[in-house]
Amino acid sequence: MGAGGRGVEMAAAISLDGVRDKNVMQLKKLNTALFPVRYNDKYYADALASGDFTKLAYFSDICVGSIACRLEKKEGGAICVYIMTLGVLAPYRGLGIGTKLLSHVLDLSCKQNTSEVYLHVQTNNDDAIAFYKKFGFEIVDTIQNYYTNISPPDCYVLSKSIAQDRAKK
């Protein structure tokens, strides 16, 4: 089989599923493995309330990643999407799973007339910053001492305007 066939095979092995009450424990387990922060009940309530904006990623039926979002209403009534977390277990990185998760949220944001997608990234997380920049996110702010109990405590706010994407389509 040629190299081109392997990519198709890999993509076929990746599937997304919604987060519901019955599988929210999968999200909790992933977060414990992926992030240095413990998330509270409000995080999980927001993730569930976001509906299709929160997804679990499976590779060959193994839960290996997730994206969890919160929908926020801005002044003037515009809806924006806040990516609370996006993570993929280390052995499964580089297979397109994070790309599939983020692309899903960006596509859904376009369809649902949201104005913006934004997130916070720890200032030393160069891989995450580069990943989001590939999708057109820009650093729009720096917040000092955003995180507690992890170093460095500062974060960047990365944002992508969805209105611009809709105009291009």
Image (cartoon, rainbow, N blue to C red):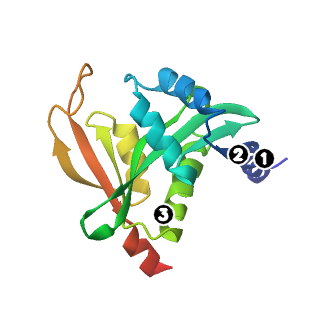
Name the residue that disc number 2 marks: 15
Asked if the residues shown at circle 3 and circle 2 are in contact, with their CB atoms under 8 angstroms apart, the answer is no
**Which label belongs to residue 88?**
none
Name the residue that disc number 1 marks: 9
Asked if the residues shown at circle 2 and circle 1 are in contact, with their CB atoms under 8 angstroms apart, the answer is no
Q: How many marks?
A: 3
SS for callout 2: strand
The residue lying furthest to the right in this view is 1
**Which label belongs to residue 109?**
3
SS for callout 1: helix
**Above or below, 26 relative to 128:** above
**Above or below, 35 relative to 5:** above
Report x, y in % for residue 112. 50, 68
Q: Dot 2: within a 10 Å radius of its alpha carbon, few (fewer than 14), some, or many (20 or more) residues?
A: some
The residue sitting at 39% across, 61% down in the picture is: 136
Identify the amino acid type marked 2: Ser
The residue sitting at 43% across, 29% down in the picture is: 41
| Residue placed most toward the observer, 147 or 4 | 147
Report x, y in % for residue 149. 25, 19
Q: Earlier in the sequence, mark 2 or mark 1?
A: 1
Identify the amino acid type marked 3: Ser
